[in-house]
């Protein structure tokens, strides 16, 4: 699928991984979300990046969010009820707050 115009972007850094949530538009002015996981691997004097991309369309937004929330809740309440997940709460300085063209794959 050809990348269309990027409308909004949010970057989440997580160790060696970075997640990109990009809202894009279609030729018909419809919108979809791409979720990209980028993992950094050392190679020679620099790094190489392995990317995996998921396309999420509007008709699946609610089902996706529900399944994700149910899965996370299952881990937190059933599998790890005594674990303190608050240590992973996002601090404001961890957010990039970037929108627009600053996040592009080169």
Image (cartoon, helix red, strand yellow):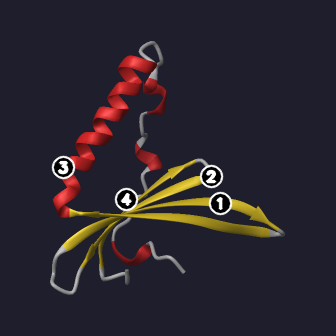
Q: Are marks 3 and 4 in contact (CB under 8 Å)?
A: no
Residue drawn where x is 18% and y is 62% of the image: 58
Residue bearing the label numbered 1: 40
Query: What x and y, as percent, mark residue 33?
Result: 30, 65
Q: Nearer the viewer, mark 1 or mark 3?
A: 3
The residue carrying mark 2 is: 16
Q: Are marks 1 and 2 in contact (CB under 8 Å)?
A: yes
Count of labels in the image: 4
User: Label for residue 25?
Assistant: none
Is disc 1 in contact with disc 3, using a CB cutoff of under 8 Å? no
Image quadrant assignment for residue 31? bottom left
* Residue drawn where x is 38% and y is 18% of the image: 78
Sort mark 2 into few (<14), some (14-19) or many (20+) by Cα contacts within 10 Å.
Answer: few
Q: CA distance from mark 1 to mark 2?
A: 6 Å
Give the camera-side residue of 3 and 9.
Answer: 3
**Callout 4: 10 Å neighbours few (<14), some, many (20+)?**
few
* Label 2: which secondary element: loop
Q: Which mark is residue 62?
A: 3
How far is disc 3 from disc 4 in space, using C-alphas?
A: 24 Å
Specify which label sits upstream in the sequence, 4 or 1. Answer: 1
Name which of mark 3 and mark 4 comes first in the sequence: 3
Q: Callout 3: helix, strand or loop?
A: helix
The earlier-in-sequence mark between 4 and 2 is 2
Q: Are marks 3 and 2 in contact (CB under 8 Å)?
A: no
Mark 4 — residue?
Answer: 97
């Amino acid at each position: 699928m050809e990348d269309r115009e990027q409308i909004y972007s949010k970057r989440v850094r997580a160790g060696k991984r970075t997640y990109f949530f990009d809202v894009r538009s279609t030729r018909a002015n419809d919108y979809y979300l791409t979720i990209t996981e980028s993992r950094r691997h050392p190679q020679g004097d620099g790094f190489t990046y392995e990317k995996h991309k998921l396309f999420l369309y509007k008709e699946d937004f609610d089902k996706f969010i529900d399944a994700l929330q149910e899965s996370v809740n299952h881990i937190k309440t059933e599998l790890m009820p005594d674990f303190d997940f608050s240590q992973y709460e996002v601090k404001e300085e961890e957010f990039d707050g970037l929108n627009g063209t600053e996040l592009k794959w080169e």
